[in-house]
Image (spheres, rainbow, N blue to C red):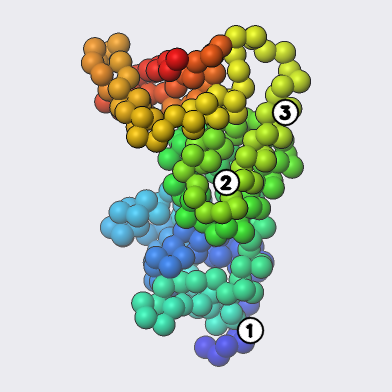
Amino acid sequence: MNKNNTRNPLSEEELTTILLAANEIIMYGGKGLLGKILSGSKDKRIYTADLHHSPMYGAFADIKQKEVMEKVEWVLANGYLTTDEKLSLLMYTDKGWDFVKDELAESIYTEFALAAEFGRYEYVDFILGQHPELKMDLLDLIEKRDSKELIDILIEWLELENFKPIPERIREVLQKLDKGNSNKPQNTDESSPFEANKKWLMIPSDVRQLLVRNVFCGHCMDTVQIEKYVIKGFRDSVVLEGKCKNCGNDVVRVID
């Protein structure tokens, strides 16, 4: 296949689908693994890497694997994806990145919102591995859409993000969302999530880790670790509301 192959060109929708699927394995897998994601393969590597949870998993399940790979080869041959020289791992070209980045930001925004709705804050780990430009685009979408329901998961992201200038941008978005919340009537005993988070982050990291691992669970009748927690404020206290790591029941830790 030559570099500018135009035989059997893909539709824009097919090209977008392949490039979105590729984002799951950039610098992790090659074209064969990409083909397996698209075809909905039951291969062990797909499940080991949780790639069966990809929104693009099985997108081309209704066509033969050979045809799927022909489409993947077309994307490579026409300069939307490339591979590194040592391990043949997939990478976006500038052409491919420019084509897909807006659609990718929309897709990740949707997944981010679903993660927030169902308390799957571990999705933040996926966000941490994304391209800095994509992170900024995601934050722009959140700010533009005034997505106040994402405040808690944004706070989780802020606590884990180390790549400058992303943390500062997260703070800017949080401040704007929180400002909108301040115009709504609320219980005077409650402080905003943003203010509560600032208090939480003022606690030394090693102390925060001890607090998270020292929460009483009424179901287990023991001290447990809290997970999937959100940070809230009540009067002068910081409140962690989450799940017991052992049994999954609701637990709360109040920090005075």
From the image, state whether disc 2 or disc 1 is nearer to you.
2
Amino acid type at circle 2 is Pro
At x 62%, y 87%, the residue is 4
**Residue 61 on image: x %, y %:** 46, 59
Residue that numbered label 1 is attached to = 6
Q: According to the image, label 3 marks what residue?
A: 179
230 sits left or right of 144 in the view: left
Q: Residue at x 28, y 58 (%)?
A: 44
How far across and how far down the image is residue 66, in percent?
43, 74
Residue 223's quadrant in the figure? top left
Q: Nearer the viewer, mark 1 or mark 3?
A: 3
Residue, disc 2: 167
Residues under numbered marks 2 and 1 in contact, where contact means CB atoms less than 8 Å apart: no
Q: Is residue 14 visible?
A: no
Q: Is residue 110 above or below residue 242?
A: below
Badge 1 crowding class, 10 Å Cα cut-off, few under 14, some 14 to 19, many 20 or more, is few
Q: Is residue 204 left or right of residue 22?
A: left
Between the C-alphas of marks 2 and 1, the distance is 43 Å
Kind of residue sitting beneath label 1:
Thr
Q: Position of residue 125 (x, y in %)?
A: 44, 47
Q: CA distance from mark 1 to mark 3?
A: 52 Å
Disc 3 marks which amino acid?
A: Lys
Quarter of the image with the C terminus is: top left
Element at label 2: helix
